[in-house]
Structure formats: structure tokens, C-alpha cells
Image (cartoon, rainbow, N blue to C red):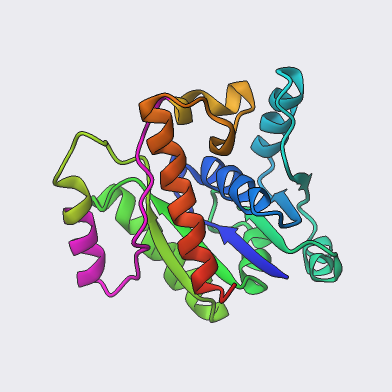
Amino acid sequence: MKIIVVANQKGGEGKTTLAMNLSAHLAERQHRVLAVDVDPQESIAAWDNAAERTGHPLGFDTAATTDPETLKALRSTDYDYIVIDSAGKLGNDVTAHAVADADFVLLPSTSAADMNLLPLVETIERTIKPAGRSYAVVLNRLDPRAITDEPEARATFNQLDIPVMNSAIRSYKAHQTASGTGLTSDRYARTRSEVKATKDFQDLTNELLAKLGA
């Protein structure tokens, strides 16, 4: 079993979208997957409800908890992968407990600008490094038409000695409406942009599995 935590104290960085699509692509590979929401907003539950309502049931299980003891017990379950969507606030003790038992932490970041960078660095320094967990930034919601945003962001993170996944997630319309329709990118229609959107998450999943030695 491997536990993956999606974390970043800054809101609006796409944690839930990343967690749900990563869970979907792990499940697509015939793994038993549980997506766990430790955010009191319970965005995963809302996504799951939308999937049932629209006739697109998820290919993996979901749960929600804010109990540290329940998080500890996840190691004894029979899932192959558990993906935890963390809360936004850095001071949230549940997020710290989740990170403490993670095999890998993914930090979605939409930009390396100061207003995005400072909260991310604080998450790394105050929560991830003290726990001794492996981690990497995922460049998220990139404009697919912009040719400079990704190289500039990578350069900034490299200067700060912050690891960055080679795979990046670009912003496509399908991602923007997915939580309302209950869709994950493994089940998008096959328009040109949706194929690209799906491939981004396929590439990220492959890279993560390689890092986990799977």
C-alpha cells in the first residue's frame, strides 16, 4: 500500500481536482483506490454525489474524516493506493497527521509568483520537511497557450531547490466543469482538448508510480 497526500496551505491551487483525477487514473490501472477528504468542506463527497447524480459513478471509493486515529488506521486497509485531499489551512492538525504517514506528498501550484510561492514554501518547511516525507511540486492549471509560464516556474523552483514533477497539468475546460458533472479525466469525451487533458493526468500518474517504485 502507498499513501499519497495532496497538500498546499493556499486555497485555489486545484488540490481536489488533482486528488480525484490521480485516484481515477490509479484505479484505471486496476488498482484498489480510496480517495480520502480531510477538508471539512468535503469537496470529494460533493464530486462523488455529482458523479452518482449524472450517471458517472467513480471507479474508486471515497471517504471523509478529520480524525487522526482514523487516518492512522488507513495503513491496515486492503487498498493499493490511498490519495488524501488535505485541508487548506497549514495549522490543520489533520493535514499534519496525514503528511506524517505519507509515502509521497504532491503540492499543486498554479504559479511561482510570491502570493503562491510563499504559502507553498511554508507548507514544505513547517509540515513536510519535519515529517521527513518525499515530495514534489506539480505545476497545475497552466495556460496551454502560454509558452513561458512553465519554464519560468520551473526555474524559480529549481533556484529554491524545490523538486518539481516533470509532468504538468494544464487548464482545459473539461477540468473546470468536472466537479459539477462528476467526471474524472479518464472518462472525458474524446475531443482534441479532452485527449490532451487526459494525457496530462496519465503522464503524472506514470511518473508518480515510478517515484513510488511501482
Asked if one can make out residue 202 in the rendered structure from this viewpoint, the answer is yes
Which quadrant does the N terminus fall into?
bottom right
178 displayed left or right of 84: left
In the figure, 145 relative to 36: above or below?
Answer: above
The image shows residue 165 at horizontal and vertical percentages of 37, 63
The image shows residue 140 at horizontal and vertical percentages of 38, 46
Asked if one can make out residue 41 in the rendered structure from this viewpoint, the answer is no
Of 102 and 68, which appears nearest the observer? 102
- Residue 156 appears in which quarter of the rendering? bottom left
Q: Which residues are magenta?
A: 152-173
The image shows residue 138 at horizontal and vertical percentages of 40, 56
- For the point 69% across and 42% down, the residue is 40
Of 120 and 195, which appears nearest the observer? 195
- For the point 36% across and 29% down, the residue is 193
1 displayed left or right of 186: right
- Residue 92 appears in which quarter of the rendering? bottom right
Of 60 and 158, which appears nearest the observer? 60
Of 16 and 92, which appears nearest the observer? 16
In the figure, 202 relative to 185: above or below?
Answer: below
Which residue is the extreme one toward the top? 54
Look at the image and say whether residue 2 sits in the magenta stretch.
Answer: no
Look at the image and say whether residue 170 sits in the magenta stretch.
Answer: yes
The image shows residue 61 at horizontal and vertical percentages of 78, 45
